[in-house]
Amino acid sequence: MNPTKIDRLVRTKRKTLALIIRPDGTLEVRAPLRLPQKDILEWVAGKREWIEKHRQEVLKEQAERAKLANRPLQSGDLIYILGQSYPLRIIKTQDSVLRLETTRLIMSSDLLPHAQAVLQKFLTNHLSLTLTLRLPHFTDLIGKEPMKVRLSKARTRWGSCSSHGNIAFNWRLAMAPLEIVDYIIVHELVHLKHPNHSRAFWAEVARILPDYKARKQWLKQYGSWLTLERINDRPLPPYRPAAK
């Protein structure tokens, strides 16, 4: 049996190994700086079934996305806003319109050629307001405040905290349930106390959010849905905390 091919090996100061299946099906392995190559290969070999299963899932999703890639948005497509799935209704009007109603999102047809940019700006503003409302609650609980908060367009990171105390949140969180937004807020704020992922870090996260593992799992499972690069025809699965 041929060994599993590692397409990209990234060594950092991390303490554990991690696998990432890229959208094109390639395998990225993240490893500690000094871990021997032999140990990495043995660990990856033991994950062969997991790798192949998730690779097929990723490739299938990419194929489905490709089928819809050339189709413009149309009425009935779903837009995710803070975990809710709003059907898009496209209307003809003399004025450019994009407004959120109780059960739907209204967009004028003249915005369709720039729909992705318009929706991204709308969602970014929505997340900015949400953060303004949510951050004070968690800074009080944790006892730390960031020097600066900004929104990012990162492709793979939901949030980051710099050594200078600046925090960034991915604008795509605007599509996630509020419980997931809160998890990323807490995750990054706790980094102001603990700059690594030590036991102390996770203990502090658990103090604030006892169900953080379930929130983390939801994001791992459905994070790929939180994008405007796919046309959504399925409601976003809700976050359900693990049963006690």
Image (cartoon, rainbow, N blue to C red):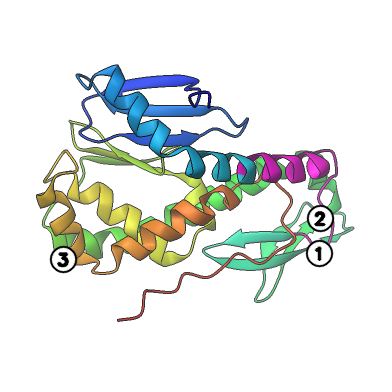
Relative to residue 59, is residue 1 depicted above or below? above
Residue at (36% x, 65% y) in the render: 214
Q: Are marks 1 and 3 in contact (CB under 8 Å)?
A: no
Per the image, label 1 sits on a secondary structure element best described as loop
* Mark 1 or 3: the one toward you: 3
Of the residues shown, which amino acid type is indicated by label 2?
Ser
Q: How many marks?
A: 3
Residue at the image point whose x is 19% and y is 43% from the top: 197
C-alpha distance separating marks 3 and 2: 46 Å
Highlighted range, magenta? 58-77
Q: Is residue 158 magenta?
A: no
User: Where does residue 131 sit, x and y in percent of width and height?
Assistant: 37, 56
Q: Amino acid at mark 3?
A: Arg
Q: Quadrant of residue 24?
A: top right
Which of discs 3 and 2 lies nearer the camera? The answer is 3
Residue 153 at x, y percent in the picture: 49, 35
Q: Quick one: label 2, few (<14), some, or many (20+) residues within 10 Å?
A: some
Q: Amino acid at mark 1?
A: Gly
Q: Residue furthest right?
A: 92
Which SS class for mark 3? helix
The residue wearing badge 1 is 76
Q: Residue 207 — which label?
A: 3
